[in-house]
Image (cartoon, rainbow, N blue to C red):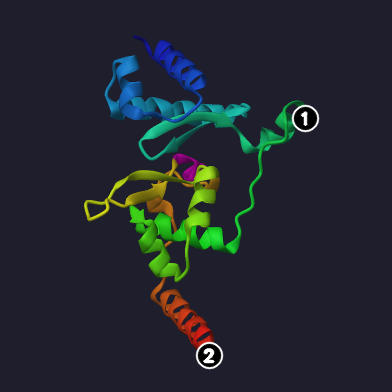
Amino acid sequence: MDRMKQEAALEAVLFTMGEAVDIRRLAEVIEETPKKTGEILESMKNCWEIEGRGVALICLEDSWQMCTRPEMYEYLIRIAKTPRKYSLSDTLLETLSIVAYKQPVTRLDVERIRGVNCDHAINRLMEFDLVEEVGRLDAPGRPLLFGTTQQFLRTFGVSSLDQLPELSAMQIEEFKEQAEQEVGQLEV
């Protein structure tokens, strides 16, 4: 298969699937190695950006997806229903941060860190498709394990969890002090 046909096949598959597709599956489709397929997709991504197309290619961990460029949303809104917007409260952000940095994590683990029940927060994050069940812990009761989704990566503009910011030792110390103060206020 020549290069133009490979690009056309990748474009057709990604357009039709409408969601991220694993690089290994894409490689099988065009009969190439995953490495070579990644190079072709990177080249397509760069060309589309230079051409200013309305769609873009994004890489989410080891998967690729075709999506609308953010600059084009205003045009979509003119013709389509307004996209569903959700608001992340401080509680949801705290819970999401714990899941993102500690995953896979059980509900009980999140509650230990936050110090309060997190059923509602985890359920809302699952509704927003930011968190999902990723398995069960091999322990008594086999509690569910939670992790982030590809939608989480898209929402926060990162292609993998490795791109999440790291906390400095000073920030961690500040958070500890704040938590201790909050606990002290609760005990009074």
Residue flagged by tag 1: what amino acid is it? Arg
Residue 161 picture location, percent across and down: 39, 50
Residue flagged by tag 2: what amino acid is it? Val
Q: Which residue appears at 44% of the width and 28% of the height?
A: 43
Q: Nearer the viewer, residue 50 or 178?
A: 178
Q: CA distance from mark 2 to mark 1?
A: 54 Å
Residue 81 located left or right of residue 171? right
Residue 144 vertical position relative to residue 4 in the rendered view, above or below: below
Pointer 1 residue:
78
Quadrant of the rendered image containing residue 109:
bottom left
The reply to whether the magenta stretch includes residue 151 is yes
* Helix, strand or loop for the magenta stretch, by majority: helix
- Quarter of the picture containing the N terminus is top left
Q: Which residues are magenta?
A: 150-154
Q: Nearer the viewer, residue 150 or 164?
A: 150
Pointer 2 residue:
188
